[in-house]
Amino acid sequence: MPKHKSNLTLEMIRRHVDALTFGRGREYAYAKHIAHARHAGDTLKADCFGSGENVYRVQVTVRDGEIVDADCSCPVGMDGDCSQTTVCAHVVALLLTFLEQPELFRDFEDLDVALERRGKEELVALIKQMLKQAPELEALLEIPLAKNKSTRVLNAETIRKQVRGHFKQSGYRWGTEGLIASAMDSILDLGDDYVANRDWRNATTVYHTVVDQVLEQFYQFHDESGALRMLVERGVNGLAECFSESVNEAMLRAETLRALFDVYQFDVEFGGIGLGDNVPEVISLDW
């Protein structure tokens, strides 16, 4: 049994949520909506079946009786409202499940540790096995690594195929926006990695392509959860940073400016739902 179980209490969980969120989380837990539960040290991970057919990735770290980090792929988590001070219902469900049924959580090894202990041949074999189970991941081999600023230019079509694939897999069913957003969050993470290495060209390609494809599909969804809207907002924020930082790259800034304007124009034509509200300010400050 994990040694930190005694540090987790019902009162601690209640301190981080309101009564409504706690109640929803308890319903998820009692309905056994937590799956693939695992833990390593102070960190808990699982999938949580939310409303409709949505499945969210949930992760929380508990240390010394306090939540020190929490993350969920649901719209609340994507909007930045899932943290050590306030958590969503899916995090509550994970914590309650662990509190009451810790035996359901299997040990898992930290990913970096698990990869570092494997040799090159073993890693190659492992990747090939993964590609057999998920052939669509082969496109990732075409993506330049963001660890160091790459001289390779990312092909936008590679990102475009991934985004379209996520929409296609959703089947355009009611309430699948959260699933789509969760899958595409990892693509935007790639853009963030490029930004961290000041690779504005490849970062712009990621943000621009994701935003463009989401807007192209936007009319086919109700997006009641706001998941697609938050994807666009995240892409716009990334584009704004690229625009602001790439001061010596006129062609790249022109491309980024066009992408930002397209979002703003879409929002106006859609009726004004708040997409790209910060675009005029970005342009006025940095152009």
Image (cartoon, rainbow, N blue to C red):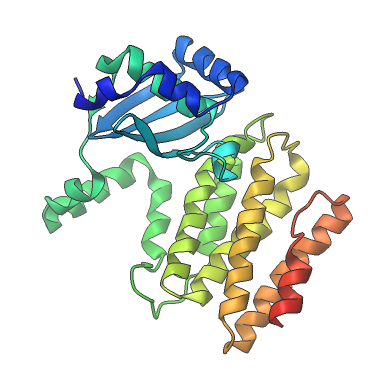
Look at 56% across and 69% down and name the residue there. 205
For the C terminus, the quadrant is bottom right
Q: Nearer the viewer, residue 174 or 241?
A: 241
For the N terminus, the quadrant is top left
Q: Position of residue 100 (x, y in %)?
A: 34, 12
Q: Please, which residue is most extreme toward the top here?
A: 30
Residue 169 visible in the picture:
no
Q: Position of residue 35 (x, y in %)?
A: 39, 22
Look at 83% across and 63% down and name the residue there. 265
Q: Is residue 168 above or below residue 28?
A: below
Look at 25% across and 15% down and name the residue there. 103
| Residue 62 location, quadrant | top left
Q: Position of residue 161 (x, y in %)?
A: 54, 55
Look at 61% across and 59% down and name the residue there. 235
| Residue 4 location, quadrant | top left
Q: Position of residue 66 (x, y in %)?
A: 37, 32
